[in-house]
C-alpha cells in the first residue's frame, strides 16, 4: 500500500480512511485478518499508537473486530461494508459537486458534463 498523508488533518483519521478504503475495495476482504499493528505502522511509517487509534475507530464503527489472542479481523457483515462503501462514495460525490460549484458549474451542468464525458 502506498500510504500518503496530508498535513492539515490528524494522521490517525487519514489512516482510518485509508484502511477503510482497503476494506471496501476488497484488499482486506470480509473476515480476513489484518496485519499486526506494528507491521502496518512500519509500512505506513507511523507510530504504532497512532495506528492503534485508527484501528480502534474502525472497531468502534464495527468494521473490524478483535479476537483476543489472534488479532484483528475485518467484519464478516457484508452489509456493513456496503454501507461504508456507499458513505465513502457519497462523500466523494459531494466533494466533487462543491469543487465544480467552485468553478461555476451548477449541479445540473455538472451532471450533464459527467454524462457527456462517460459517453465519450
Image (cartoon, grey):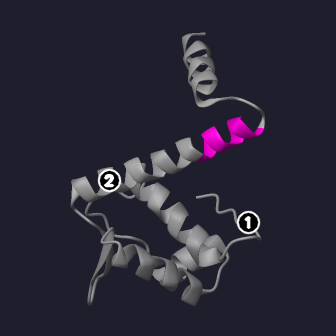
Closer to the camera: disc 1 or disc 2?
2
Q: Which quadrant would the N terminus be assigned to in this image? A: bottom right
Q: Which mark is residue 83?
A: 2
Residue 64 percent location from the top left of the image: 33, 72
Question: What residue is at 21 percent from the left and 60 percent from the top?
Answer: 77
Spatial CA span between label 1 and label 2: 26 Å
Secondary structure of the magenta portion, mostly? helix
Residue 59 percent location from the top left of the image: 35, 77
Above or below residue 101? Residue 66 is below
**In the visual, does 21 lie left or right of 3?**
left
The residue range painted magenta reads: 95-102
Residue 74 percent location from the top left of the image: 31, 66
Above or below residue 6? Residue 89 is above
Q: Which quadrant would the C terminus be assigned to in this image? A: top right
**Depth check: 49 or 61 in front?**
61
Find numbered disc 1 in the image and state the secondary structure of the residue it sits on.
Answer: loop
Question: What residue is at 47 percent from the left and 52 percent from the top?
Answer: 88
Note whether residue 26 is visible. no
**Depth check: 91 or 58 in front?**
91
Question: What residue is at 61 percent from the left and 39 percent from the top?
Answer: 97
Q: Which residue is mark 1?
A: 6
Dividing the picture into quadrants, the one containing residue 67 is bottom left
Amino acid at each position: 500500500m502506498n500510504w500518503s498523508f496530508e498535513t492539515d488533518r490528524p494522521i490517525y483519521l487519514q489512516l482510518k480512511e485509508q484502511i477503510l478504503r482497503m476494506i471496501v475495495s476488497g484488499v482486506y476482504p470480509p473476515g480476513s485478518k489484518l496485519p499486526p499493528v506494528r507491521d502496518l505502522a512500519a509500512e505506513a511509517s507511523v507510530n504504532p499508537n497512532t495506528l492503534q487509534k485508527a484501528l480502534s475507530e474502525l472497531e468502534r464503527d464495527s468494521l473490524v473486530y478483535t479476537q483476543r489472542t489472534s488479532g484483528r479481523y475485518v467484519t464478516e457483515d457484508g452489509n456493513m461494508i456496503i454501507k461504508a462503501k456507499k458513505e465513502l462514495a457519497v462523500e466523494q460525490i459531494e466533494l466533487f459537486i462543491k469543487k465544480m460549484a467552485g468553478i461555476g458549474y451548477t449541479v445540473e451542468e455538472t451532471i450533464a458534463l459527467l454524462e457527456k464525458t462517460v459517453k465519450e
